[in-house]
């Protein structure tokens, strides 16, 4: 099928995109890389009256770092972010998650912000974003607001963004040097759609865990933080047994959905396995005093 007819607006800047959202109303949609929106339009699950293309807005394709965070503009393509030196040095978990998200041509077009704004419950990039913590900077005509990562995802394909807002950038908290990271994914082939993922960060204080972040995707309508498992891990000097226990706690309260890729029961088992693997790798990569 082909997409239904629509009007095309090329936004020259973030402010121009915000003005266009206001002018064309709730039926208009931001077009970033188009890797999710265009397929949805082609199968008529989306039929916006206006597409507001931010792909050539010069003020949105940045990647920058300041006090304690890395900012990624809404125009920055996944491939560029994945290979950016600042991202690799400060938020390598994000680069690892992008590396598992779709095939290389898709990552050349798709944006990091587009994946987060889309809110697919199985997607890799939102899981890494939530694991880091940080915020979404939303812009509408005349104002901007910061939405904490923990409040942004509200359900499958539903976010805290209002109809007249676009995401200008996402900001990821940088964890201290020596933090271990790992991204694990179960999918039916290396580059196919994820079934379940686990994104993990561990900060050490000597041999003990000082802080941990464990997020899974593909187990609920939104990326899911394993808060109880994180709390139980803090203060422990982890062993293989501890890691298995923490992974079991992370999956214990999940009630995942079932689909063609796996039943809810199956996803729950896979989630525990992904968390166990990710924790093991993250701990092996961690080091130094907090
Ligand atoms: C063959 C194929 C395989 C794929 N495999 C995977 C995979 O394994 N894992 C995965 O997670 N994804 C996968 N995808 C989806 C892909 O990664 C998309 O790039 C990503 O989900 C969306 O990014 P985008 O820039 O293309 O956004 P678009 O498709 O342009 O937009 C997606 C949605 O977000 C909104 N949006 C985008 N930017 C903004 C903004 N700045 N402000 C407000 N709203 C905005 C749009 O209006 C739209 O509703 C795949 C896609 C294809 C075609």
Image (cartoon, rainbow, N blue to C red):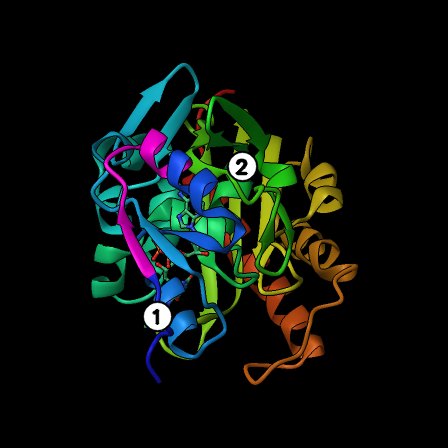
In the shown orientation, is residue 235 left or right of residue 70?
right
- In the rendered image, the vertical position of residue 290 relative to residue 22, given as above or below: above
- Which residue is most to the front? 23
Give the magenta range: 7-18
**Which of these two is toward me, 8 or 42?**
8
CB of residue at label 1: within 8 Å of ligand 1? Answer: no
Q: Quadrant of residue 102?
A: bottom left
Is 17 magenta? The answer is yes
On the rendering, which quadrant does ligand 1 occupy? bottom left
Q: Earlier in the sequence, mark 1 or mark 2?
A: 1
Judging from the image, what secondary structure is the residue with disc 2 in?
Answer: strand
Query: On the image, numbered disc 2 is attached to which residue?
Result: 202
**Which of these two is toward me, 102 or 212?**
102
- Classed neighbour count for the residue bearing mark 2: other residues with Cα under 10 Å, few (<14), some (14–19), many (≥20): many
Query: On the image, numbered disc 1 is attached to which residue?
Result: 5
The percent coordinates of residue 201 (x first, y second) are 51, 40
């Amino acid at each position: 099928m082909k997409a239904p007819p629509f009007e095309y607006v090329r936004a020259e800047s973030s402010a121009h995109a915000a003005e266009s959202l206001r002018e064309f109303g709730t039926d208009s949609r931001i077009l970033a890389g188009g890797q999710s929106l265009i397929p949805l339009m082609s199968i008529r699950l989306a039929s916006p009256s206006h597409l507001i293309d931010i792909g050539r807005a010069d003020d949105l394709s940045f990647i920058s770092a300041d006090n304690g965070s890395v900012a990624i503009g809404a125009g920055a393509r996944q491939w560029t972010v994945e290979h950016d030196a600042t991202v690799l040095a400060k938020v390598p978990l994000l680069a690892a998650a992008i590396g598992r998200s779709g095939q290389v041509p898709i990552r050349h077009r798709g944006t990091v912000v587009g994946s987060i704004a889309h809110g697919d419950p199985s997607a890799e990039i939102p899981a890494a974003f939530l694991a880091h913590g940080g915020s979404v900077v939303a812009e509408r005509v005349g104002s901007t607001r910061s939405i904490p990562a923990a409040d942004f995802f509200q359900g499958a394909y539903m976010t805290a963004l209002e109809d007249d807002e676009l995401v200008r950038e996402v900001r990821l908290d940088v964890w201290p040097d020596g933090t271990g990271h790992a991204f694990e994914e179960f999918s039916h082939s290396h580059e196919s759609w994820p079934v379940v993922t686990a994104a993990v960060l561990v900060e050490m204080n000597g041999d003990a865990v000082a802080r941990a972040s464990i997020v899974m995707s593909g187990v609920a309508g939104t990326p899911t933080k394993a808060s109880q498992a994180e709390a139980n891990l803090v203060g422990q000097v982890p062993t293989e047994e501890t890691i298995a226990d923490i992974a079991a706690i992370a999956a214990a309260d999940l009630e995942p959905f079932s689909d063609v890729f796996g039943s809810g029961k199956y996803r729950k088992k896979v989630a525990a396995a992904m968390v166990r693997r990710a924790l093991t790798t993250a701990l092996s990569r961690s080091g130094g005093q907090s």
